[in-house]
Image (tube, rainbow, N blue to C red):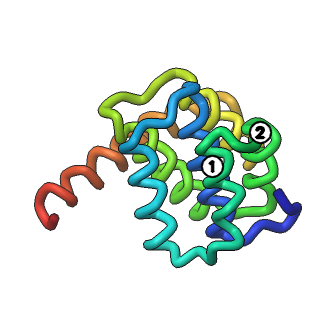
Amino acid sequence: MQPHMDKMTRVLTLVVAVILSDGHVSPEELELFELMVEDLGVEEAKVHAFRQALNGQVDFDRERAVIEAAQGIGWAEVAEMVREAYVVAHVDQSVELAEVHVIEPFLRAAGMPAERLPAARAWARMAMQHMALAEAVFG
């Protein structure tokens, strides 16, 4: 990843790191990734390497990538990215420990103190539940 990522690249970096964290890429995760790419309007040139990583064609250094993605961003963007990451993590109806172990280093790299990580986890889970409810209500 480049040192000065744009917002869309940062979001996809964290999302792909979460998807790859448990060693299995589900069809639901791939579908959600493609929906996010479409919603974000990311150009193909930026998505190609992520697709290769999801298909196991290239190595993806999750730890380095999430640390780079967290550099120089504000808390509003961090919160949005963490919410997106938890949504992706929950697409298979559970959040695996391996997925949390990707999100927390991202938060630490963004400057969050360790004592605030449990509160960030709780917030992210509530935000994810609100998004699921909104989808059920509004479609």
Label 2 neighbour load within 10 Å: few <14, some 14-19, many 20+: few
Vertical arrangement, residue 92 with respect to residue 72, above or below: above
Between 25 and 118, which is closer to the camera in this rendering? 25
The answer to whether 12 is drawn above or below residue 54 in the figure is below
Q: Position of residue 13 (x, y in %)?
A: 66, 53
Name the residue at 19% across, 52% down.
133
Extreme residue toward the front, this view: 57
**Quadrant assignment for the N terminus:** bottom right
**In the image, 86: left or right of 50?**
left
Q: Determine which residue is flagged by label 1.
A: 14
**Image point (64%, 64%), residue name:** 47
Check disc 2 and report the residue beneath it: 59
User: What's the residue type where badge 2 is placed?
Assistant: Asp
Quarter of the image containing the C terminus? bottom left
Instruction: Identify which residue, 124 or 21, lies in the foreground.
Output: 21
Residue 95 appears left or right of 100: left
Residue drawn at the location 69% of the way across and 69% of the way down: 46
Disc 1 element: helix
Q: Which mark is residue 134?
A: none
* Rendering coords of residue 31 (x, y %): 39, 53
Q: Give yes or no for contact between labels 2 and 1 (Cβ–Cβ under 8 Å).
A: no
Q: Quadrant of residue 58?
A: top right
**In the foreground, 76 or 59:** 59
Instruction: Report the amino acid beneath label 1.
Output: Leu
- Residue 98 percent location from the top left of the image: 57, 24
